[in-house]
Image (cartoon, rainbow, N blue to C red):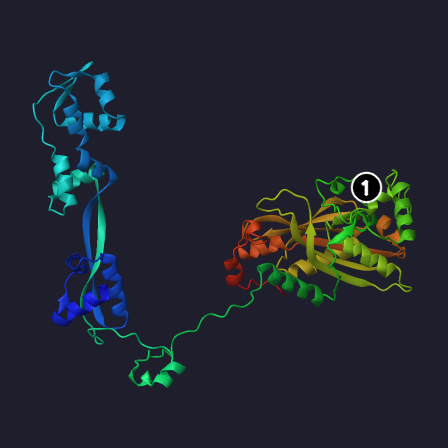
Amino acid sequence: MAEEAVLRFLEKNEEILDSGKFAVETGLTHDEIVNVIKSLSAFSFVGAQDIKRERWVLTDEGNSYATNGSPEVQLFLAVPPDGISREELQKKLNPSMFKIGCQQAIKNKWIEMGKSQVSRKVEHVHDRVKELLLQIQTGEAVNLEDIDALKRRKLITPQVWKGFSVKKGPNYAPERKKAATDLTRENLQKGDWKDLEFKGYNFSAKGLPLEGGHLHPLLKVRRQIKMIFLQMGFEEMPTDNFVESSFWNFDALFQPQQHPARDSHDTFFLKEPSTTRSLPEDYVERVKQVHEVGGYGSRGYGYNWKREEADKNLLRTHTTAVSSKMLYKLAKQKTFTPKKYFSIDRVFRNEAVDRTHLAEFHQIEGLICDRGLTLGDLIGVLNDFFSRLGMSKLRFKPAYNPYTEPSMEIFSYHEGFKKWVEVGNSGMFRPEMLLPMGLPEDVRVIAWGLSLERPTMIMYGINNIRDLFGHKVDLGLIKKNPICRLGLQ
């Protein structure tokens, strides 16, 4: 309907000067006319020029005054010729109407406000505000001084009106035929393909973007850290079991059964299956012995070690549970072979979720097992490893871990933050952990660990861990994240 009106008008006339006036003349809405003009212009049936006009429209308050009168006139009419008490007058008008009406009526010198009585100072008033608002409502001209007064009272607001002037385009026709996009079997059978107008092909148009997989920032950084370990001669440990027994997760690491980390507030225990099916009994007995009475130069913890605690299944709280299994497997070999192991995988802790903590995260762990290793070897390996991550300034602080002695927290100087930041933990595994496995007495194990999320958040400028990992991650981050290289040397 709107398209036919535009094309038929241009058939007999040179131009539609104003789409707004044209809409009124044809009885159509302006939106309908605008949509048709845009469509015809896209196919060069018409040429359109933008028209912009600014006009004043009434606010909600202005519309109310145009209908019911201004507050000052309403207040004046509420005052009888012989006057009225202030309290009675307030009852006749709502609070906002009374307040505004009093201000304007006093300013116009229409009323006199006594201490207890309100009286008229004139017999009749003219509602100039209502008159001006009605003029603006009907599109009549209003002088700038009156416009400014209404604008200050927030009774009118500017509105930009957009329309078009329209002329014939290079492809103008009194009627638009829909161009065919395909040559169908029916066209060939009927023979009407000879009369069809086909839509031209745009060979420069881009096709639909192909949807493909995208690497998560964590996977990118994980890959780079894995390559660092491999370059240093490490081999990856199998970390595909998220469920471990308390024995491998705690007891084998010489962590006492009364340790706070083993409480349900810090660990996720399984209901089904709640306990492990099998453990190496001879090794379990040696672990029990070293916990209760000590051995290998240690006094132990001096408590009654309970098998039922060791049998409990849980979601592993650290990948060191895997390290304990790998070291036990290494100890069972007939001939000891030095090893370098690493792992990067998920661990689970029953922690309160906030901007820096999740109940599920990734741990990076590296360990070296060899004869005669010392704390100096650990510091040297840590300097080599972290320098490949771009952290060349390191400091070490003594710390406590149940299964390492000595233990050290690792700090790196952050050039962006201009301060020392903790980046990991490290230490040498205790004899109480290694010797019950059956490893030779001169074998030492140095190890260190850090999270995968913290360096990734720093590299990608992410402040909240929930924006990086979990169900609330924005898929746009996955699709558009850049490659952030570690400081490889």
Q: Residue furthest top?
A: 116
Tell me if 13 is positioned left or right of 339 in this view. Answer: left
Work out whether 292 lies above or below 436. above
At horizontal 81% and vertical 54% (from top left) the residue drawn is 324
The front one of 269 and 260 is: 269
Give x and y (percent) for residue 42: 28, 70
Work out whether 171 lies above or below 216. below
Work out whether 87 lies above or below 214. above
Q: Which residue is the site of mark 1?
A: 257
Give x and y (percent) for residue 356: 59, 47
**Residue 133 lies in quadrant:** top left
* Picture quarter with the C terminus: bottom right
Give x and y (percent) for residue 482: 52, 63
The front one of 139 and 212 is: 139
Q: Residue furthest left?
A: 123
At horizontal 12% and vertical 38% (from top left) the residue drawn is 131
* Picture quarter with the N terminus: bottom left
**Residue 389 lies in quadrant:** bottom right
Quick check: can you spot residue 372?
A: no
The front one of 235 and 195 is: 195
Amino acid type of the residue tagged 1 in the rendering: Gln
